[in-house]
Amino acid sequence: MCENLQMLKQGAEAKLYICNYLGKPTLIKERFKKNYRHPDLDTAITKERIKNEARSIVRAKVAGVKTPALYLVDFERRRIYMEHFEHSITVKDFIINVFTEDQNTEDGQSTFDSIATKIGETVRKLHDSNIIHGDLTTSNMLLVPKNNSEQNNTDWYQIDNIDIVMIDFGLSHIDTSAEDKGVDLYVLERAVISTHNDYPDLFWKILDAYKSYNINNTNEIISKFEEVRARGRKRTMVG
C-alpha cells in the first residue's frame, strides 16, 4: 500500500516517513508510544491528538489556508498519511540560506515583505476560524511553488509563484478565546526572534499584516498578546 518507505526525520513526538501512497508522494507522521504513561491513557491521549491534528488541517483548508491534503488517519498504527511537498523549502531555511544573498536588493526586500505579509494573513485566517496552531514557527511554514514544478532553477520561489503552506498541527486545538490567540502570537514572536535575530522587524511586519487582514476582534487579541508578552518578560527577568 505504501511503496518506497523511507524515514525522513525523528522528532520529540513522532517519526516522519516519506513514501508513495496510492501513487502520490506522501508524508507519514507516526506518533511514539509513551511508556511512562499507562497504555490505555497513552492510547486515549494519542488518539485525541491525532483527531485534533486532522480536524485542524481540514478546518484550516476550509478557511482558505493551504495545508497538506489528508489521505488516511490510522489510529491503530498512530499514523496520519498526508500530502508530501517534494519541491518546497521552509520559511526558516529560505530566510537563512536563500534570502541572505538578496536582502540588500530591491527585489529581495520586496520578497521579504511579501512573505511576512503572507504569514500574517495566514495566521489571521487560522485565528478567525478559531484554530490555535500551538507551534507557530518558520520551520512549520513551507514555501511551495504554485505549479508544483521541479526546482530546476533559482526563480521557483519568486513571490508570485509561491504559496505558504502551514504544517505540523500536532499541538493545535480549536478555541475562541483571545487569550489563546495571543499566546499563539507570542510563540511566533519568540520563535522569530530566536531564529531570525538578524531581521528584527520580521515579526512586526507579520503582526502588521495580521492586524490589517481583519479588524474584527483585533484589539482584544493584541491586548492579550501584550499581556502574555509582559508575563513572559517578567519570568525572564525573575528567572
Image (tube, rainbow, N blue to C red):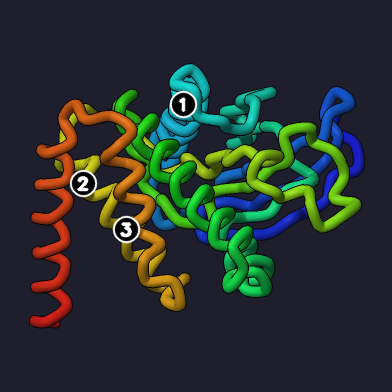
Q: Locate residue 70: give its quadrant.
A: top right
Q: Amino acid at mark 2?
A: Gly
**238, above or below 29, in the image:** below
N-term-proximal mark, 2 vs 3: 2
**Residue shown at the point (83%, 51%) measured from the top left:** 6
Question: In this rendering, does residue 39 appear at all?
Answer: no
Q: Is residue 150 left or right of residue 84?
A: right
N-term-proximal mark, 1 vs 2: 1
Q: Is residue 105 left or right of residue 197?
A: right
Q: Residues within 10 Å of mark 2 (few under 14, many from 20)?
A: many
- Residue 77 drawn at (x, y percent): 64, 34
- Residue 184 drawn at (x, y percent): 29, 48
Mark carried by residue 216: none
**Residue shown at the point (42%, 42%) measured from the top left:** 42
Seen from the viewer's position, the closer of residues 97 and 115 is 115
Cα distance, mark 1 to mark 2?
18 Å
Q: Residues within 10 Å of mark 1 (few under 14, many from 20)?
A: many
